[in-house]
Amino acid sequence: MNQAQTREYDLEKPAERGWTDDQDVSLRLGVTLARCYATYVKALASRVQSYGLTTPQFGTLEALYHLGPLSLGDLADKLLVTGGNVTYVMDRLEGQGLVYRYRRPDDRRVILARLTEEGRDLVAEVFPGHASYVEHLSRHLTAGEQGALAGLLRTLGTGIQDKDL
């Protein structure tokens, strides 16, 4: 075997494990979380698309439906997106006649978003089926397991938020 063939053979070997067992558990958790999240988001996006909306559009409508008028900044925080993304989503939803924006009367610097009657009717129509679909996706875990997982994920997320960001 010549030197080039030897190097090629070495590249086919897996890398030597240079991490601890605890690191291995954490690495596997990260991969598992990422794969589960990607699968879950794909399933939800497919469902939301059947309503004629994108996931950020539906999230905006759902937040306004359940929480009432919100500032664009509050919407960005709730949806975990940038202000620019909220503006883009609002432009599209406003163009469809589902939301409108207005300035807060006591502080004209703040722009609020509110559902139109058409937007409220749309969410009222699709949300019950959406809730059933989310329940369907979650059926692989018992209600107790779902609660436990939600608690664990909340603990992980707030721990990272508080100590690592």
Image: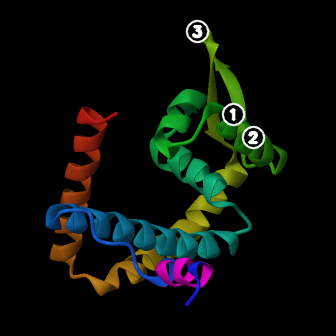
Q: Is residue 2 left or right of residue 142?
A: right
- Residue on which the image places disc 2: 88
Question: Which x, y percent locates residue 86?
Answer: 65, 38
User: Split into 4 quadrants, where in the image is the C terminus?
Assistant: top left
What kind of secondary structure does the magenta stretch mostly adopt?
A: helix
Q: Is residue 43 left or right of residue 154?
A: right
Nearest to N terminus: mark 3 or mark 1? 1
Residue 84 is labelled as 1
Residue 107 is labelled as 3
Residue 114: quadrant of the picture: top right
Nearest to N terminus: mark 2 or mark 3? 2
Residue 35: quadrant of the picture: bottom left
Q: How many marks?
A: 3
Question: Nearest the camera: 25 or 164?
Answer: 25
Residues at marks 1 and 2 touching, judged by CB atoms closer than 8 Å: yes
Q: What amino acid is found at the position of numbered circle 2 in the picture?
A: Tyr
